[in-house]
Image (cartoon, helix red, strand yellow):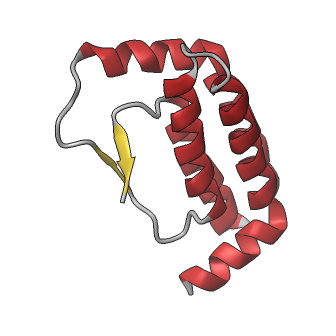
Amino acid sequence: MKTIGNIIWIIFGGLHIALEYFIAGLVLMITIIGIPFGIQNMKLGMLAIWPFGTKVKWKPSQPGCLSIFMNVLWFFVGGIWIWLTHIFYGLIFCITIIGIPFGKMHFRLAKLALSPFGKELV
């Protein structure tokens, strides 16, 4: 069932979201300062291409206040725009009954788009 959900996800907007993450990640990796943000974008892109069946957990060893600082910086640099994209798609998908699981997935990704540092994909 997860595979079918992921294939339908890719067809109905998942590819667009993943491309948004991958392109933003490549642009951020141009500068040395943007490399950590680009790496997080690539991880989020992998989650956006195959979200059903993937879990997000806190990393077992927290790097201290660096992840908090990076999340705050991330929020103002690009997290808010990605969050808005996920909220928009989530609302659009929740209009129909069939689209509710995909809308819920967009809301899950929106929550992750606001603070991706300190988390890992399992």
Q: Is residue 65 above or below residue 85?
A: above
Residue found at the very far left of the displayed protein: 61
Quarter of the rendering containing residue 70:
top left
Q: Is residue 34 above or below residue 52?
A: above
What residue is drawn where x is 31% and y is 16%? Answer: 66
What residue is drawn where x is 71% and y is 77%? Answer: 7
Of residues 19 and 114, the one nearer the viewer is 19
Of residues 88 and 116, the one nearer the viewer is 116
In percent of width and height, residue 74 lies at 54, 19
Q: Is residue 38 left or right of residue 61?
A: right
Where, quadrant-wise, is the N terminus in this rendering?
bottom right
Q: Is residue 11 visible?
A: yes
What residue is drawn where x is 36% and y is 40%? Answer: 119
Number of disc labels: 0
What residue is drawn where x is 58% and y is 19%? Answer: 34
Q: Is residue 79 left or right of residue 8?
A: left
Q: Is residue 52 left or right of residue 20?
A: left
Q: Is residue 89 above or below residue 71?
A: below
Q: Is residue 86 visible?
A: no
Quarter of the rendering containing residue 61:
top left
In percent of width and height, residue 79 lies at 62, 26
Where, quadrant-wise, is the C terminus in this rendering?
bottom left
Quarter of the rendering containing residue 68:
top left
In percent of width and height, residue 64 lies at 21, 19
Q: Is residue 10 above or below residue 1?
A: above
In percent of width and height, residue 58 lies at 28, 43
Of residues 74 and 40, the one nearer the viewer is 40
